[in-house]
């Protein structure tokens, strides 16, 4: 808003007000902001739950844990002895596997966001330098 001198009041500056602006709509900046929004929207629900309610979004771990219990129950039905310790170990193993998966996904998304923000800054930098030259 400031760099491109869009004139949008601070409190009304949002994705839609910036992208709907005639100077932005349909430009490369609009496309970059759209990609950035798409990437970050995946985490909006979890972020809002955490920030506004102090709650955490339910993770796939719960589904995997239920699957694990079903597998151990099937083993019991087949006559295989499954101790509580073994059941707990399987659940913990899958929890670690799930965390590793989540970490990998989050690292990939962080790299995407970094790339998109870098692309946006590269596009805005020439305008920023021009604007800065007007002010001592």
Image: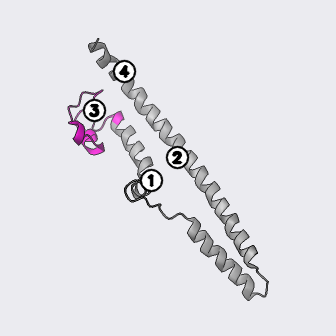
- Disc 1: CA contacts within 10 A as few (<14), some (14-19) or many (>=20): few
Residue 34 within the segment the image draws in magenta: no
Give the mark nearest the N terminus, 4 or 1.
Answer: 1
* Range of magenta residues: 1-29
Q: Give the label on residue 43, or none.
A: 1
Picture layout, residue 5 above or below residue 110 = above
Picture layout, residue 120 above or below residue 130 = below
Indicate the quadrant where residue 73 lies. bottom right
Majority SS type along the magenta span: loop
Q: CA distance from mark 3 to mark 4?
A: 15 Å
Q: Give the label on residue 61, or none.
A: none
Q: CA distance from mark 3 to mark 1?
A: 24 Å
Secondary structure, mark 3, is loop
Q: Which marked residue is nearer to the observer: mark 2 or mark 1?
A: 1
Question: What residue does disc 4 label?
Answer: 126
Provide residue 104's location: percent of width, then percent of height: 61, 50
50 horizontally vs 66: left or right: left
Image quarter of the N terminus: top left
Q: CA distance from mark 2 to mark 1?
A: 10 Å
Question: What residue does disc 2 label?
Answer: 109
Q: CA distance from mark 4 to mark 1?
A: 31 Å
Secondary structure, mark 4, is helix
């Amino acid at each position: 808003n400031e760099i491109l001198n869009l004139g949008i009041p601070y409190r009304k500056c949002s994705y839609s007000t910036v992208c709907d602006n005639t100077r932005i709509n349909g430009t490369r900046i609009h496309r970059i902001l759209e990609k950035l929004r798409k990437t970050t929207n995946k985490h909006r629900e979890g972020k809002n739950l955490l920030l506004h309610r102090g709650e955490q979004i339910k993770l796939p771990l719960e589904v995997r844990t239920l699957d694990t219990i079903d597998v151990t129950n099937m083993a019991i039905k087949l006559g295989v002895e499954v101790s509580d310790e073994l059941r707990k170990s399987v659940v913990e193993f899958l929890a670690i596997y799930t965390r590793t998966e989540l970490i990998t996904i989050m690292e990939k998304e962080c790299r995407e966001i970094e790339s998109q923000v870098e692309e946006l800054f590269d596009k805005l930098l020439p305008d920023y330098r021009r604007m800065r030259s007007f002010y001592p």
